[in-house]
Image (spheres, helix red, strand yellow):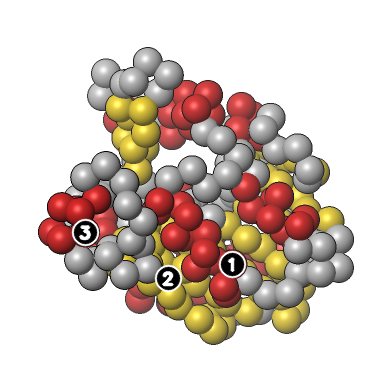
Amino acid sequence: MNATVKSTLQLYERWAQVYPPVAHNPLMRAEQQSMLQMCPDVAGSRVLDLACGSGRYSRLLLEANAAHVVALDFCVPMLRQVSAASRICASMMHLPFQAAEFDCVVCGLALGHATDVREWMVEVARVLRPGGTLLYSDFHPEAVRAGMTRSFKDEGDATWTVPHHAYEIDCQRDAAAAAGLEIETLSEVRMGLELKEAFPGSEQIYRDWHGLPVVLSVRARK
């Protein structure tokens, strides 16, 4: 069955059945390393894990001594795997929080599910306190142009592709600026460089796509 006939929520409900609450493939591990290198000191902070999925960043934030972590996602089966944070089921486009409620917002590999990047940035900026930090990652637009998809195999070994938007870097910069956020750092995960962990078929893939940026990580301050 073609995944495009299913909604993004339906696909994540299916994916949740096989989606562990850890970085479970080489790309995610490289993405996570990039994000952690850019992460501010969250000790004593109130943090929002936005589009948290199964909660891998919630766990890492609490291990870094965040005072309180709120894990938000629109997929209940994903949220059920989050064990250590306060869980809220909601859209990342309409956050059910008061203004300036968080010291930091972390969002891993989910920007492409925003229906409008400007609206998303405005909503994130609204819930950040002055001086607060937004840290997010997503598939790099160059990787999307090269044919990379957000795909998974379900319990029956069927392959599904989750639709997502590829927002250009300049578009992300403009959206951040319009929301009152200043981008401090941009980091790329590139094939064969930052991403070099071996996996079946990796030798050929790293040769064919050597140097291709596949993940973009961004840190911005309000």
Please, what is the three-letter code of the amino acid marked with disc 3?
Tyr
| Residue 100 in view | no
Residue 85 percent across, percent down from the top left: 78, 45
Q: Position of residue 26 (x, y in %)?
A: 40, 51
Amino acid type, callout 2: Gln
- Find residue 206 and name its label: 3
Q: On the picture, is 40 further left or further right than 137? A: right
Name the residue nearer the viewer: 2 or 154.
Answer: 154
Residue in the picture at 73% in, 81% down: 131
- Give the spatial CA distance, label 2 vs label 1: 21 Å
Callout 1 secondary element: helix
N-term mark: 2 or 3: 2
Answer whether labels 2 and 3 touch (C-beta < 8 Å): no
Q: Secondary structure at mark 3?
A: helix
- The quadrant the C terminus occupies is bottom right
For mark 2, what is the residue?
172
Q: Is residue 110 left or right of residue 105?
A: left
On-image quarter of the N terminus? top left
Q: In the picture provided, is 8 more to the left or to the right than 94?
A: left
Which of the numbered marks, if any, corresponds to residue 137? none
Compare residues 124 and 80 and report the one nearer the observer. Answer: 80
* Left or right of 211 in this view: 55: right
Using the image, tell me which numbered label, if any, was put on residue 36. 1
- Classify mark 1: residues with Cα within 10 Å, few (<14), some (14-19) or many (20+): few
Which sits earlier in the primary sequence, circle 1 or circle 3?
1
Q: Position of residue 194 (x, y in %)?
A: 37, 68
Residues under numbered marks 2 and 1 in contact, where contact means CB atoms less than 8 Å apart = no
- The residue closer to the viewer here, 25 or 19, is 25
Amino acid at the residue labelled 1: Leu
Measure the alpha-carbon separation of dots 1 and 3.
24 Å
